[in-house]
Amino acid sequence: MKLINSVGPNPHVVRMFMAERGISLPIEDIDILKGKNREADYLKTNPAGQSPCLVLDDGAIIAEITAICEYLDEKLPGSSLIGTTAEERAQTRRWTRWVDLNIVEPLANGFRYSEGLPMFQSRMRCLPEAAAGLKAKAQDGLAFLDTQLATRTFVAGEKLTLADVLLFCFLAFGGAVGQPLNPELKNIGRWYAAVGARPSAKA
């Protein structure tokens, strides 16, 4: 199998996850800045035109970053970043979903509808009037998560999981596109520095 990769936080999530798990796959880059992911050749592979995309040996594709990471976690040997018990997996999935809905999606769409509008306005429905509110919603999510991180090391508990990888990659992206971390969120800051110091963060 191979990973179709590009710039952006979504592929970063999968690359960081793979690095944490010690997974190495062939990687094929696609230029999303030039819209190559929206051209007919790529749409034959992934009709949604998204990156990243995992192409299996039989030609089947897996899109959506959490689905890709869960597939790799289940399919390949190594220490799971999802969990080894039903309880661990439930907590990881709970917090991964929470982070996605309350921080990642509003942060990303806040970017797409403002700083990223020149790139995205011809590719998807954009709501520029919603950008400021979405960015504020992401900050609200971070403020809540800051209170949770007062009593645990990582997002879902005492071990790094997919929830941490997802959040870190999007906060790193946010910092580069006008949505920096609030320095008053001390627990988030501590967590971010610790996760950012891991070699996998540079994947």
Image: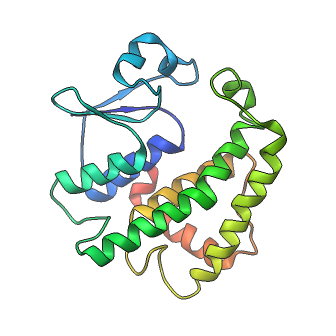
Residue placed at 58% from the left, 81% from the top? 148
Q: Position of residue 39 (x, y in %)?
A: 48, 13
At x 67%, y 51%, the residue is 107
Q: Nearer the viewer, residue 70 or 149?
A: 70
Quadrant into which the N terminus falls: top left
Residue at screen point 40% across, 18% down: 42
Q: Is residue 172 above or below residue 8?
A: below
Tell me: 151 left or right of 3: right
Residue lying at the far top of the rendered structure: 40
x, y percentage for residue 17?
36, 54
Q: Is residue 22 visible?
A: no
Q: Quadrant of residue 188?
A: bottom right
**2 horizontally vs 77: left or right:** right
Percent across and percent down for residue 134 are 74, 52
Quadrant of the image occupied by residue 83:
bottom left
Relative height, residue 127 to residue 183 (above, below): above
Tally of marks: 0
Along the viewing direction, whichever of 24 and 97 lies nearer the viewer? 97
